[in-house]
Image (tube, coloured by chain):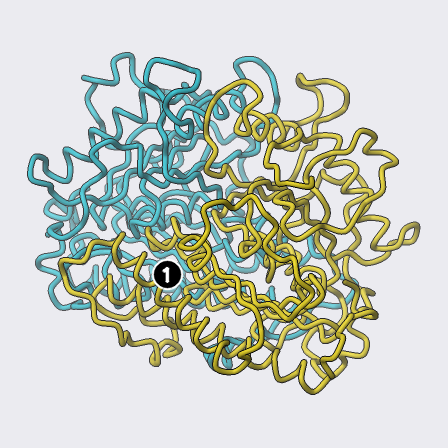
Chain colours: A cyan, B yellow
Amino acid sequence: MSASSPHLGDIGSAELDEIYQFAVELGKNAGQKLMDGVHARIGGSISGISSDDANMTSNLAFTEKDSSVDIVTQVDEDVEHFIHEAIKTKYPTHKFIGEETYAKTSSSAREYLITSSDPTWCVDPLDGTVNYTHMFPMFCVSIAFILGGRPIIGVIYAPMLHQLFSSCVGRGAWLNESTRLPLIRNAPASDKRAFNDINDNIGIPPMPSNAPSKCVFSCEWGKDRRNIPGGNMRRKIDSFVNMAAEKGGENGDGLQGMVHGVRSLGSATLDLAYTAMGSLDIWWEGGCWEWDVAAGIAILLEAGGLVTTANPPEDPETAAIEETKLGSRLYLAIRPAGPSATETGRQSQERTVREVWKRVKLLDYTRPGL
Amino acid sequence: MSASSPHLGDIGSAELDEIYQFAVELGKNAGQKLMDGVHARIGGSISGISSDDANMTSNLAFTEKDSSVDIVTQVDEDVEHFIHEAIKTKYPTHKFIGEETYAKTSSSAREYLITSSDPTWCVDPLDGTVNYTHMFPMFCVSIAFILGGRPIIGVIYAPMLHQLFSSCVGRGAWLNESTRLPLIRNAPASDKRAFNDINDNIGIPPMPSNAPSKCVFSCEWGKDRRNIPGGNMRRKIDSFVNMAAEKGGENGDGLQGMVHGVRSLGSATLDLAYTAMGSLDIWWEGGCWEWDVAAGIAILLEAGGLVTTANPPEDPETAAIEETKLGSRLYLAIRPAGPSATETGRQSQERTVREVWKRVKLLDYTRPGL
């Protein structure tokens, strides 16, 4: 999925630009509808520090008796319907996979959802539903455009954070359409015209030489909270502890990861977006569905990040580091990295993957064919 | 610290308003300086979705050779100096406690820092330093004004999130100066004039009847990561697992908290701010210093929240729920809550405190006199 081999098939550059622009506008409008739901619940709009939110007045009409759960469900369905209709109108031949639509029509989620090489949209109208219900700002809309089974356009908009992440294969990844991702680089980041050099990772810091030490590690507790031996929660906790522990205590074997910080945001989509930004160094998770990660993977890869499987192979030191399979439900993401005196950026990312694999347990989220 | 007994001593209402307005402006200006540091590091400004950040161009001059750590340390010190000078100029008789100043002048942090009843400012120029270093948006400046040992004004500004939290005793707690906290309430939230009724918690949801179930639980891994028996990390992990686990697995005793979500943001100050907002239901932490929590406690209490000790008493069912002691380093915060048909808001908060105490371990962060 590198920018130099976009696999665009019949889609030309101008058409790709048009699809990208359409996706960005769709994401902005959908995010605005999420904020409308927030404003309806608080009975007014949240003003910005400046006057930036003057346009954010609600146009949804909820009655006072509606419960917060009713409103959230309604917003979720309305926003997916809005996105689906817009896509059907503009691109009637494209396929569509959305979380809400899928939940209503399928009895099993055990099949791979992206099986065709046709142009396909993969949409989560609201990622971070629990956050949204609680009005914690870490929620977003996620829109991916997939071609040949690969997400090549990604749009993630977190309206309460004022952050729009977007990418198109070969055109770079961006915050708010004007600042290149990752944010952290020593070269000027604001020259959007220079997208011919978008794969230039000079100035981006390499992964720390003793990673995962000095890394910010992002992980989620997830929904599988059965506290049973061999269950996913215990495997996760053991992994988190290995990543977090200082050297010198127990667990021996030099496995103590000593990460700089452990973060849990409650949104897989935003975990990927912040990894693309370079703010999270490592994200490790199991159990996500395609709509949770498709746009985030597009953005992370275009920013220069790496995504592979969460589950460690038998020999983490030598196993091939394979590109993630959309739908595998098991993800390990590493932020974009530039070269050091002794390694390429990619080498420092792969070294980090192996160090994470040594410290984490196998998670049990299977799918046919895996 | 209730609004009905402000303990204002010699400070009259007009003077209090003036101090509040001064603190809010100081917070805004200090937060702008934090963003200047971000912009300096990325070599440009981050544009907003709208044109809201047009005024956010950097006026700091860093050279390209400065490392990110140098820049962060410099920003931290510069912002504290800026705040300290502004306070010295405006209120030369007030005392000042700041994280950076304190770290340079004290060999031990084991003494209580707020020992006088005199007007005192307690300032963290940059909370969430790891986040700031990584340009993860969960960082902020925190400014508290303390009288009689109680924080009565709080200002927290997270500039990259576009969120300003502020409160003054008897005048309510606010997001961006215009939306009352907590956000979640059925009554209109935007009528700032009605501050006579600021303690009216009608419309704010009570704590869930089976809390901590259905609650968003916020906790931090912290800096003490020694993986040793009886160490704080293991005590924390055991507590997190008790709060998170589903019923039906191990640990027995009905201790499974089944919280709706577990969040770790990496900023104690913002944990408190989001608890005041109602977005986090429960925050439980040990190890914070006064500057980490003073402004957040002011805002949370004014919003109608509760803060007590993190460490469970011998009989969590019957022990008195005492007001937190600033400097105790052990905090359990519960979001604002309104009445149900069977309980007052306060009763639902106290019930939640007891349910948390049953599930958490004693943490070891001592101070003389505790």
- Label 1 SS: helix
Among the 4 quarters of the image, the one containing residue B197: bottom right
What amino acid is at disc 1? Asp
Side (left or right) of B43 relative to B278: left
Q: Residue furthest bottom?
A: B14
The residue sitting at 25% across, 13% down in the picture is: A315
- Percent across and percent down for residue A66 are 75, 61
Side (left or right) of B168 relative to A81: right
Side (left or right) of A208 relative to B116: left
The residue sitting at 83% across, 53% down in the picture is: B346
- Percent across and percent down for residue B242 are 65, 28
The residue sitting at 66% across, 53% down in the picture is: B326
Image mark 1: chain: B
Q: Quadrant of the C terminus of chain A?
A: top left
For this rendering, which residue is in front, B260 or A95? B260
Q: Residue furthest right?
A: B342
Asked whether residue A159 is in view, the answer is: no
Asked whether residue B210 is in view, the answer is: yes
- Percent across and percent down for residue A97 are 43, 46
For this rendering, which residue is in front, B10 or B317? B10
- Percent across and percent down for residue B72 are 31, 57
The residue beneath circle 1 is B76
For this rendering, which residue is in front, A128 or A161? A161
| Mark 1 surroundings within 10 Å by alpha-carbon count, few (fewer than 14), some (14 through 19), many (20 or more) | many
Q: Is residue A39 above or below residue A19?
A: below
Among the 4 quarters of the image, the one containing residue A181: bottom left
Count of all numbered marks drawn on residues in the image = 1
